[in-house]
């Protein structure tokens, strides 16, 4: 008699070369069920926990590679927030389900036979690697073309022009478990973001190998979802303002309100010393540097800025203070590797109030900063981030 398939007993071997997915898997409950023909993910309405439902008979028949890709398929639904009501309004749920599966399956190559796949069968004219929203627009366009040609029932007679087979997993409980606008939906969205963030942090501890088979464009998408999308210029200005400190000096021009005419008053002058460390390793593009420099020029009205070029070291002869009203253009004056400890130790020794590091993030985590520190990078660089930090990261792209 064959033993019933238990997914928990196979997870370790299935995901041994997939640290990111393995970390996410540990945060997702797995539950076998005979009520589902294949597999699916949902938010449990009773416990509010994310869980993966699977039919043990379905998994028993799959090869090891297919089991692995089915797992990743379900986890991608969570990562891309398909479960937590990302569906556009007034869209046929079935069409959205197909769009999400096409987006995910583009990145998998060992799914069970007959699964939806761009470039194959009904979707032979669909390219791989698009988002669910992009595939949805292609599906809507295809539906319209079929209706105009009098073939609106498509292959399965459903009226939406979609084939009746090809989906191996169930999406039926997505909307039921997290109704849009409900408190449960809001909690679920934040919880899965936290799960993905912590899983990504665990993966990045192992360097680029920690992502396993996750394609570079998907890594970028994941990391962009984890970074708060704010106007980087406003974020930069806010950081500068919160770095400013008060210095007091005595002056007879201002009356002391408590001891009038006995003691001189105190004149409060807001000032700050801000260090801006520039990574010269070569991975940060010149156009991004130029964009950032143009914004720094405006900030000299608020703070005293010292520019600190670095690679694996800081060269004192290359450091300069950016005077108010002065104009500087970015010049690549060093071209070595990257060591964040070099500028951090230099800044710590000088008593700065704030430290901004413009970098590609591709070096080990540095020592602690004695002042508040913020990291500036691009979305392309962020996907290769080599360390985790609770410090602010802002993305400069345009």
Image: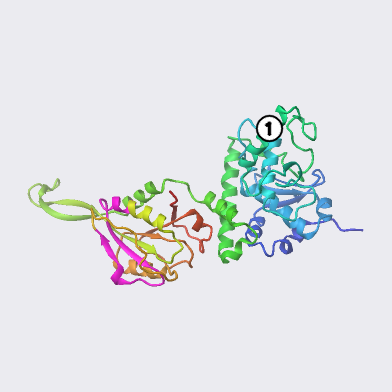
- Give the residues in magenta: 295-322
Q: Nearer the viewer, residue 319 or 152?
A: 152
Residue 52 sits above or below residue 204 on the image: above
Residue at the image point whose x is 38% and y is 72% from the top = 313
Q: Nearer the viewer, residue 351 or 376?
A: 376
Tell me if I can see residue 43 in this picture: no
The percent position of residue 75, horizontal first and vertical second, equals: 67, 51
The percent position of residue 181, horizontal first and vertical second, equals: 58, 35
Tell me if I can see residue 250 in this picture: yes
Residue at the image point whose x is 60% and y is 44% from the top = 188
In this view, which residue lies farthest toward the left? 261
The percent position of residue 215, horizontal first and vertical second, equals: 62, 57
Q: Does the magenta stretch include residue 5?
A: no
**Residue 109 sits in quarter:** bottom right
**Residue 160 sits in quarter:** top right
Q: Does the magenta stretch include residue 297?
A: yes
Q: In this view, does 353 lie to the left or right of 368?
A: left
Residue, disc 1: 92
């Amino acid at each position: 008699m064959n033993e019933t398939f238990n997914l928990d007993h196979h997870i370790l071997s299935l995901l041994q070369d997939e640290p990111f997915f393995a970390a996410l898997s540990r945060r997702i409950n797995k539950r076998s069920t005979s009520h589902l023909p294949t597999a699916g993910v949902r938010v449990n309405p009773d416990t509010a926990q994310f869980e993966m439902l699977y039919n043990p008979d379905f998994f028993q028949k799959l090869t090891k590679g297919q089991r692995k890709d089915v797992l990743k398929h379900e986890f991608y639904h969570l990562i891309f927030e398909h479960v937590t009501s990302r569906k556009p309004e007034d869209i046929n749920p079935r069409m959205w389900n197909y769009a999400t599966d096409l987006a995910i399956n583009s990145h998998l190559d060992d799914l069970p036979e007959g699964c939806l796949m761009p470039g194959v069968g009904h979707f032979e004219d669909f390219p791989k690697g698009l988002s669910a929203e992009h595939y949805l627009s292609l599906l809507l366009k295809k539906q319209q073309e079929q209706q105009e040609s009098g073939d609106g029932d498509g292959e399965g007679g459903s009226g939406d022009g979609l084939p009746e087979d090809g989906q191996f997993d169930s999406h039926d409980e997505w909307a039921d478990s997290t109704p849009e606008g409900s408190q449960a939906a809001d909690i679920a969205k934040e919880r899965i973001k936290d799960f993905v963030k912590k899983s990504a942090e665990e993966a990045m501890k192992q360097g680029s190998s920690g992502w396993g088979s996750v394609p570079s464009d998907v890594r970028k998408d994941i990391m962009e979802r984890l970074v708060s999308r704010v106007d980087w210029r406003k974020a930069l200005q806010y950081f500068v303002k919160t770095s400013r400190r008060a210095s007091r000096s005595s002056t007879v021009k201002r009356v002391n309100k408590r001891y009038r005419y006995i003691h001189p008053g105190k004149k409060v002058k807001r000032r700050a010393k801000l260090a801006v460390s520039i990574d010269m390793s070569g991975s940060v593009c010149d156009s991004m540097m130029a964009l950032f420099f143009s914004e720094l020029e405006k900030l000299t009205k608020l703070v005293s800025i010292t520019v600190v070029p670095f690679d694996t070291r800081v060269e004192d002869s290359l450091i300069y203070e950016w005077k108010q009203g002065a104009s500087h253009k970015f010049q690549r004056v060093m071209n070595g590797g990257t060591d964040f400890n070099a500028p951090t130790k230099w800044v710590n020794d000088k008593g700065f109030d704030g430290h901004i590091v413009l970098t590609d993030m591709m070096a080990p985590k540095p020592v602690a900063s004695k002042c508040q520190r913020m990291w500036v990078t691009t979305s392309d660089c962020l996907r290769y981030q080599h360390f985790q930090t609770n410090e602010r990261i802002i993305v400069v792209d345009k």
